[in-house]
Image: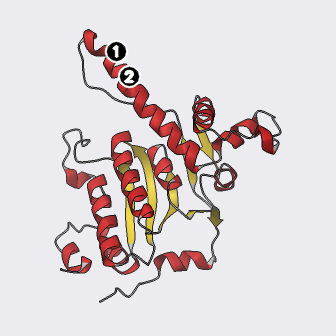
Amino acid sequence: MPSLRELIKGRRVGPLHTPWIHFETRSRIALLLGQVASSTDTGGNPVESIPHIAEEIIGTLMLFAQEDREKPIKLLINSTGGSIQAGFMIIETIEHLQKGGVGILSFIMGESYSMATVIAACCRPRYSTSASTIHIHMPTIGIPRMREADAESVKEFQKGLSKRLYEILASHTRIPEYHLKRQGLVLKNRSRPTRLSERAKLVRSFLETEQFFSPEQAKEAGIIDDVLYPGDKRINDIYQFVVPQE
């Protein structure tokens, strides 16, 4: 089987990709840059206009897992968010690999908006630079023009996607507790929301308005695990070259 380095030689290389191609292949780094989109979300624009489409990210994660299941994969994020469906594709791949014992960490480098934040929250561990902006909001789902008779089924479809997103955040973050604390409620252990449906309902309530977090606030909300400041050795560890298994 050809190595990842051999397989990746044929990919497109431009000003953005040139330095990163070395880190991707030598440091087990997958990149989520620009918008979250799949090949079906380009709106008529060429796929090459999107720095890293979902299928490419998924392929990179799977290749790294095949190459070495013991060493962690690093997902670096600087993204304005985008397609819910493309995001779910990436999340399902992350969860599949995690269940197989593959570690995937996330590192927010600058911006993590909307669906990018949901993806980041599903990794372990989850880091952010101290200057990053982290954002999340209620899902908005674009549907092509439809007949009036189809409106109800489309509404149910949208409701299902939204429910799934709320449940992901309810499972992977402490947003329910963060929301209640911001409302001035002091929680005792017995009153902490534990059922997934109850937690998802609190996430939905929290996302009724646009939510922006500083890295420290995102840590308190359980979206990330730690903030990495300049000089933190863990930043060097993320970019550290890895010697692949033969």
Read off the residue under disc 1: 152
Q: Which one is in front, 118 or 1?
A: 1
Q: Determine the residue positioned at 53% across, 63% down.
A: 124
Q: Quadrant of the N terminus?
A: bottom left
Contact, mark 1 vs mark 2 (Cβ under 8 Å): yes
Relative to the observer, which residue lies in front, 147 or 34?
147
Q: Quadrant of residue 52?
A: bottom left
Q: Secondary structure at mark 2?
A: helix
Examine the rendering and report whether any part of residue 16 can be seen: no
The reply, left or right, for residue 130 in relation to residue 88 is: right
Q: Which mark is residue 156?
A: 2
Q: Give the crowd class for mark 1: few <14, some 14-19, many >=20 residues within 10 Å.
A: few
Q: Amino acid at mark 2?
A: Glu
Residue 216 place in picture, x, y as percent? 69, 55
The residue sitting at 64% across, 69% down in the picture is 229
Compared with 104, 210 (above or below) is above
- Alpha carbon distance from label 1 to label 2: 6 Å
Residue 9 percent coordinates (x, y): 19, 75
